[in-house]
Image (spheres, grey):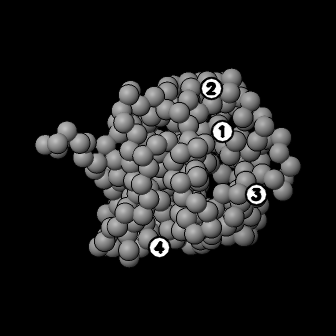
Amino acid sequence: MNGNGVRKMKLQAILNTQCKHKLREVIHFDNKPKGEVEFNLCAQKYERKYLQCEHCGHWFSFHELDLTDLYKEDYVTSTYGGVEGMKRRFHKIMSLKEEQSDNFNRVERVNNFFSITKGREFKGKLLDIGCGLGVFPYAMQVRGWDVSGLEQDDRTLSYLKEEVGIEKIMKDISEVKKNEFDLISLNKVLEHVVDPIKLLTDVAKLIKDAGIVYIEVPDTENASTFGNPKTREEFFIEHHHGFTLASLSQAIDNSGLRIQSARRILEPSGKYTIYCFATLSKSFYRKLI
């Protein structure tokens, strides 16, 4: 609080890149937008905004709300209505027609990339970070991949094992063995993390020398250009960051990875998305050894 009893907002997102961020306010929320999940904010006044960098276009969340426990039990309950709700959502997504499914396209995209780069059909070891409902690791397991997952919520861990069939699930990244995975995936994860470069740096230490990191994030630039930011989920409270292709590229470059391929797409669900495939930087690899 300041001297007048007004709460002072603060930056909730960290992105330390070569960009000298020059920030300006682009959107302000005084109330929960329509469609946003009703999280338990313990009677905190709902007020937040996004600041955008005039150079790289990155969006930074700015508020004074305590979201410490957002991805623990409250997230599962608020977002899905509990484990039964997760099961219903999983089956609904998996029953979508191929042309309607973001996940079908994701699975095809990843497997086609490996087929092209390896010159043959390839099935290796996958670590999916932030499994959520488990639709991606499940589909990859069906395609023959040896799948492991990383999730921090206990109920989600149990759900992934018992309902989705992902046996190898870890709760903390420190449990993951280094140099074991051919593919590490982060699907719509980085925008939820306060310091995504730190997470990407940890990922770079885990991937095999010739492994691939697959990343998806919401495309903030297109979402704000072709839609109203106050009504789109790309700008809901749980998103600390709003990436552009430029800011995502800088974040990856600063983590010891290098982009091999990147693209901006409009998914069947109507989501604007950036996806990319990245490999371990040779200079970063030399530091590790």
Find numbered disc 2 in the image and state the secondary structure of the residue it sits on.
loop
Residue pointed to by mark 2? 81
Among numbered discs 3 and 4, the one appearing first in the sequence = 4
Residue pointed to by mark 3? 268
- Indicate whether 267 appears above or below 133: below
Among numbered discs 3 and 2, the one appearing first in the sequence = 2
Q: Position of residue 199 (x, y in %)?
A: 41, 51
Residue at position x 33%, y 67% from top?
Answer: 23
Q: Is the residue under label 2 in contact with that under label 3 (CB below 8 Å)?
A: no
Q: Nearer the viewer, residue 282 or 79?
A: 79
Disc 4 residue type (three-letter): Ala
Image depth: mark 3 or mark 4 in front: 3
Residue pointed to by mark 4? 246
Q: Give the CA distance from mark 3 to mark 2.
A: 25 Å
Quadrant of the rendered structure where residue 218 is? Answer: bottom right
Q: Position of residue 44 (x, y in %)?
A: 36, 32
Residue at position x 70%, y 57% from top?
Answer: 270
Q: Is residue 166 left or right of residue 201?
A: right
Q: Nearer the viewer, residue 188 or 107?
A: 188
Residue 11: give its label: none
Q: Is the residue under label 1 in contact with that under label 2 (CB below 8 Å)?
A: no
Image depth: mark 4 or mark 2 in front: 2
- Dot 2 surroundings within 10 Å: few (below 14), some, or many (20 or more)? few
Q: Give the CA distance from mark 3 to mark 1.
A: 19 Å
